[in-house]
Amino acid sequence: MPSDSTPLVGNSLVTQTTVVSDLIASFLGQRLGKHSLSPALFDLLSTVYTLKDRGSQVEVAERLGISAASTSEAVRLASNKGLLEQVADGTDKRRKRLLLTPKGKQKLQSALEELQAADQALLEGLRAEEVEAAISVLRKAEQNLVRAVRSAPSE
């Protein structure tokens, strides 16, 4: 339980980024839903896309930070929806590469358009200098957190 001196709102960067993150997730969840996409399915499709048709389930799982079993289930569901296909790797027949189908590419394109809409909604009324300053602060905060996570003692 927080103490009386623990701020829950106000000038805390963690609090504000959490609020904004939650609102973005809600906005995107609504917008992606119009295209029969969940945020998790969008993450899967975009990760396969960024691996440029060379990624395996193992590589996708590592990038997304999820278990092999969860990735396998997500790939199965996406394949059943006609969004992904698995093809044998030319050099290692045991390894299956994940490819976006034309339908998967179309869904991903629709999702990217929704991300642009979210970006526009987020930045409405802000000057270019304000956006640049916010991005700069967030990048530095990200670097600080990466260092903190890496230096934290593991359990």
Image (cartoon, helix red, strand yellow):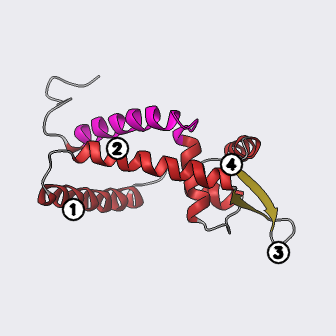
Q: Which of the marked residues, 3 or 2, is nearer the chain's N terminus?
A: 3
Compare marks 4 and 3 and give the one earlier in the sequence. 4
- The number of callouts visible is 4
Q: Position of residue 118 (x, y in %)?
A: 34, 44
Q: Residues within 10 Å of mark 3 (few under 14, many from 20)?
A: few
Residue nearer the viewer, 145 or 133: 133
- Dot in front, 3 or 2: 2
- Tell me the number on the disc at residue 90: 3
Tag 4 or tag 1, which sits nearer the N-term? 4
Q: Position of residue 64 (x, y in %)?
A: 56, 52
- Front label number (2 vs 1): 2
For mark 1, give the secondary structure: helix
SS of the residue under disc 4: loop
Q: In which quarter of the image is the N terminus?
A: top left
What label sits on residue 83 in the rendered view? Answer: 4
Query: Does 45 appear in magenta?
Result: no
Percent of width and height locating residue 131:
19, 56
Instruction: Give the overall secondary structure of the magenta segment.
Output: helix
Comes first in the chain, label 2 or label 1: 2
Residue furthest to the bottom: 91
Disc 1 and disc 3: Cα gap in Å? 43 Å
* Position above or below: 100 against 4: below
Give the residues drawn in magenta, as a range: 14-39
Near-viewer residue (65 or 101): 101
Residue picked out by circle 1 = 136
- The numbered mark, 4 or 2, whose residue comes first in the sequence reads 4
Q: As shown in the figure, which amino acid type bears the numbered disc 3?
A: Gly
Q: Which mark is residue 118?
A: 2
